[in-house]
Image (cartoon, helix red, strand yellow):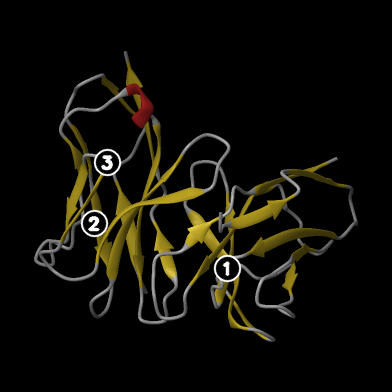
Amino acid sequence: GNSVTQMEGPVTLSEEAFLTINCTYTATGYPSLFWYVQYPGEGLQLLLKATKADDKGSNKGFEATYRKETTSFHLEKGSVQVSDSAVYFCALSDPNEKLTFGTGTRLTIIP
Amino acid sequence: DGGITQSPKYLFRKEGQNVTLSCEQNLNHDAMYWYRQDPGQGLRLIYYSQIVNDFQKGDIAEGYSVSREKKESFPLTVTSAQKNPTAFYLCASSLEGVQPQHFGDGTRLSIL
């Protein structure tokens, strides 16, 4: 079956540091890939997505590239802010449109 | 503004009691989903519905039930058969055949 493996957290960085959160997946066929963000006490918000190999999703300074050869979709941001503190989830969707989530990575940014 | 409304935000259940979590959307989405989130874990799919009057079990449906009588509404009942119901429950919706899913703000269920 499908699965998503995310970098273990928690991750703590200083403001303006470079961020990478690793995500790899196992799936049959060609899934779509997503990053969602969850702020404390809230639901999930879509951060970015990519629907085919070599696509780059980007939003709010975050980027991730769909790498079919390495089955990866790592999340990156060049300069993080305190407001980026949240839990980040990598996910994939199968042909039946069900989402499979990773376990989430908690990110804390220190001023 | 369009969106997904979950209520209540916090809910307490007594032993042996059924409770129902509400989920309403005004996005005109066809598909709706219920997930359970436990600390340190990802989201696990409980039930989903792609059309009115039809729904399918997800990965952890035991102890839960749903109905989909209206396009806008997809309530989840946590029955007394669910022995470990304490969790954060998230409802989501999407256009059929189109991702991504849009999420509500969740309901936190605890046992008294």
User: Which residue does the numbered mark 1 point to in the structure image?
Assistant: B33
Residue closer to the observer: B89 or A25: B89
Residue closer to the observer: A76 or B39: A76
Residue B15 spot, x, y in % from top left: 89, 50
Q: Quadrant of the C terminus of chain A?
A: top left
Callout 2: 10 Å neighbours few (<14), some, many (20+)? many
- Disc number for residue A24: 2
Secondary structure under badge 1? strand
To the question of a shared chain for discs 3 and 2, the answer is: yes
Callout 3: 10 Å neighbours few (<14), some, many (20+)? few
To the question of a shared chain for discs 3 and 1, the answer is: no
Q: Please, what is the three-letter code of the amino acid marked with disc 2? A: Thr
User: Which residue does the numbered mark 3 point to in the structure image?
Assistant: A60
Q: Please, what is the three-letter code of the amino acid marked with disc 1? A: Tyr
Answer yes or no: do the residues labelled 2 and 1 have beta carbons within 8 Å? no
Nearer to us: label 3 or label 1: 3
Secondary structure under badge 3? loop
